[in-house]
Amino acid sequence: MKIGIVTYWKSTNNYGEQLQNYALQEYLRSLGHEPFLIRYDYDADTIYGTKPLPVRFLRACNPKRLAEYFKSKSLNKKRAMEGITHPRGFEAFREKHVSMSRIYSSIDDLRRDPPEADLYITGSDQVWNTFGGKLSEMEHRYHAFFLDFGKEGVKRVSYAASWGRETVPEDEAGLIRQLLPKLDSVSVREKTGIGLCSRLGREDAYLALDPVLLLGAETYRKLYRGDVAVRREKKYLFFYYLNNGLDFDRQTVFEWARQRNLEVVYVTDDWHEDFERSFPGIPEWLELIDDAEYVVTNSYHCAIFSILFGKRFGIIRRKGAHAGMNSRMETLFGLCGINSRFIDAEDFEALELPAGNPDLEKLKAAKRPEDVIEAAFTR
């Protein structure tokens, strides 16, 4: 069966985004299907990329937004230069491991010339999270990520889709209540997502495994074992930090490691010039987790790889507007049958817990792609 997948794919520094994409395709291929990424350009298909210049100008005149604009412009310039100086090879990884369609510039483009497929999948990752964007900005993206395009006979499902939050504003809820019924099968990544789907009119949503959990550790090790690895002579703590305004003192991680005579390999998706950073490619990133003594992160997928590779690890808890993302970690701990691994800048006790191996019986309770596909075709 030919399967088109809509998910996040454009990042040049978010490793989990790329690996969940790879994992879902790899698993679907093992079932005999022909999966491909529908390269929907979600960044362009918002108010920022599609609204008339006068509308964007009026938005920019807001003093708060104006300050944020100049701050982000400066940071984006630094990131762009850093990407040139320290390329991580994400595009090369996609070209090698991910089947892809042409780039679709908008929901209108998807509707005019929809990709040929027997089944569309939305997910995994936070495809149903607007990350604070208003409905007026994100409406086109909503339609694309709820698969509101394509021929009538094509089946449509969500696989391990994540809301990344526990509530949605009422104006968004109104649109979602129109879009959710069009899906032939609905699966989500977090238990809280089941409740949110129910409140939005889909009481038949169920829990599915994140694609990264569909493959074993040895499959991921094959991605780096063919390369010439640069082994580190000294033991180290791997610190992978996704920046989204967290109130966390990163210096405490370095101090904790220093007290144990460990180096710190620090990888981030943002501009933190106050710490020495590393810029690994995707295979190297996997190897860095696999060889680490400890892992500290606020990344969901880095947490999964820490579990798959049998690492002692700690999770930085999200706070404020991003607190809804913590439910994915709680679901992960429950699925894998391990103790909570949350830490904060004053308490690193979780790092001393034994490495947790996934409870295979608990993992079996969550649905897999074949279950979601079967549900869609028997609805």
Image (cartoon, rainbow, N blue to C red):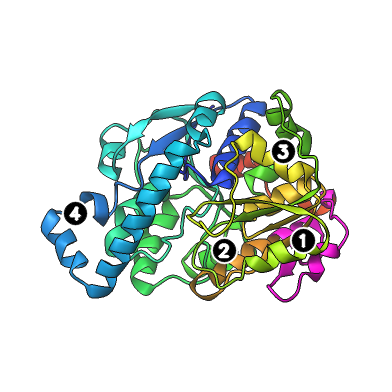
Query: Spatial distance from mark 2 to mark 1, Cα to Cα?
Result: 39 Å
Magenta span: 332-360
Say which residue label 3 marks. Answer: 287
Q: Earlier in the sequence, mark 4 or mark 3?
A: 4
Say which residue label 1 marks. Answer: 258
Q: Is residue 13 visible?
A: yes
**What is the crowding at mark 4: few (fewer than 14 residues within 10 Å), some, or many (at least 20)?**
few
Q: Nearer the viewer, mark 2 or mark 1?
A: 1
Q: Earlier in the sequence, mark 2 or mark 4?
A: 4
Query: Spatial distance from mark 2 to mark 3, Cα to Cα?
Result: 32 Å
Query: Spatial distance from mark 2 to mark 4, Cα to Cα?
Result: 31 Å
Residue type beneath disc 1:
Arg
Q: Secondary structure at mark 2?
A: helix
Say which residue label 4 marks. Answer: 51
352 vs 46: above or below? below
Query: Spatial distance from mark 4 to mark 3, Cα to Cα?
Result: 43 Å
Q: Residue 339 in magenta?
A: yes
Q: Is residue 153 visible?
A: no
Q: Earlier in the sequence, mark 2 or mark 1?
A: 2
**What is the crowding at mark 2: few (fewer than 14 residues within 10 Å), some, or many (at least 20)?**
many
Q: Nearer the viewer, mark 2 or mark 3?
A: 3
Q: Residue 29 in magenta?
A: no
* Residue 32 rendering spot, x and y as whole percentages: 63, 24
Query: Spatial distance from mark 4 to mark 1, Cα to Cα?
Result: 51 Å
Residue type beneath disc 2:
Gly
Q: Secondary structure at mark 4?
A: loop
Q: Nearer the viewer, mark 4 or mark 3?
A: 3
Q: Secondary structure at mark 3?
A: helix
Q: Secondary structure at mark 1?
A: helix
**What is the crowding at mark 3: few (fewer than 14 residues within 10 Å), some, or many (at least 20)?**
many
